[in-house]
Amino acid sequence: MSGSANFELDLREFVTLNIKCIHFFGYFSPEFAENSKKRILFRIYATVFVGFAFVLSLLSQIANMIDAFGDMEKMTEASFLLFTNIVQCLKLYCFMKYGARVWRLVHSLNRKIFKPRNATQYDVLKRDIGRSKIITKLFLLACTITYASWCVSPFLDKKGENGVRLPLSGWYPFSTKETPAFELAYAYQIFTTWVGGLGDISMDTFMSGAIMVISAELSVLNNALETLKQRFVDDPQKIREEEKLVNKELVRCVIHYKNIIGFANEVTYLFTDCITAQFLVGVIIVCMSMFQMSLVPVMSFRFFAMMLYQICVLMEMFLWCYYGNEVILKSDLLTQSAYMCEWVDNSKEFKQNLLYFMTRTQFNLQLYASGYFALSLQTFKAIIKSSWSYFAVLNQVHDQKMA
């Protein structure tokens, strides 16, 4: 049998990049000693940074929504970013409230049972770690491009006599039409929305990274079951000893499966509220952004910026649903993988244990948000359908008012 030392991996790499980003934005505390100077300094930094870059911006958007109440166009313009930040506020709360448990979850990735034991398993985990990092980088880049589009849209889409407007709606206790008030409000808006967007994406891709771990470990478990007996050399003189070793490997697979379920339950417990809120509010955000896109010229830069924003929101939810769907599909394969383990010539005890395991795996592993929304492609499809339906109704009501 091959030793696991040849296939050493730090599985925390699935979420290392995300954690660094969340630390930088002050949303998640590093592991400092209790009452250490670094811990105190980080809390001061987080309070000032989050307060300036997030809380003040959120208050501005809430005030703007109240000010725009009754005007459909202004309300929809104010709402899509407001709802995004409200959900982000919930994510921020979860990371702060469950900080210690999140750290335990991260460190639990390196438990021995999750480690690869052959080249195939190593390649699967290495590949998925690479994908997790690439996905995070692509989302951060997409966020930057989106907010760069917001940044230049006021200067490229001037509205005649109205002149240059702020890239996003917001309420301020002073007029933003004069210099230098406009420049200050413009700089603050761009900075806070960009930083807020990067922080939000860092948390979302952390959650998707955790779901990717579950998917990857199910792939590893499938491989372990399929190659259960291949790791041993048939020797008629040591048949009893081999039967015990094969049965021991099966027990290890059962323990591995229980660990995967335990990890999945912890991920669900920590982030179920965040994912539920994102799904529910995501429908509204996509609906509102489509409505805003219908109000501006197709060739305008604002239309392009809105389209990029909508794609980012949809892709965040798609990521959870896609890898949640992969968890379902791979857990469905466990029974088949167990059956392929060359069980015919094994002991009665092994066959009984295998039968119990196969019976348990008839019930596939599914991740749920609040026990209602399954993370699957069907759920993502339902989100798209609902968003389009609400947009059609909203657009019809708007057309009737304009008639």
Image (cartoon, rainbow, N blue to C red):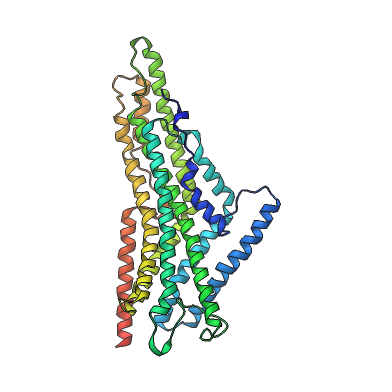
31 with respect to 141 (left or right): right
Residue sticking out furthest to the bottom: 161
Q: Quadrant of the C terminus?
A: bottom left
Residue 157 pos. (x, y %):
38, 80
47 with respect to 178 (left or right): right
> Where on the picture, by quarter, is residue 205?
bottom left
> Where on the picture, by quarter, is residue 372?
bottom left
Residue 296 pos. (x, y %):
34, 79
Q: Is residue 189 visible?
A: yes
24 with respect to 282 (left or right): right
| In the rendered image, the vertical position of residue 164 relative to residue 342, given as above or below | below
57 with respect to 375 (left or right): right
| In the rendered image, the vertical position of residue 228 relative to residue 375, given as above or below | above
Residue sticking out furthest to the top: 237
Q: Is residue 374 visible?
A: no
Which residue is located at x 69 percent, y 49 percent?
34
Which residue is located at x 51 percent, y 73 percent?
189
Out of 306 and 253, give the one closest to the viewer: 306
Count of marks overlaid on the render: 0
Residue 61 pos. (x, y %):
51, 75
Out of 17 and 315, give the one closest to the viewer: 17
Out of 161 and 33, give the one closest to the viewer: 161
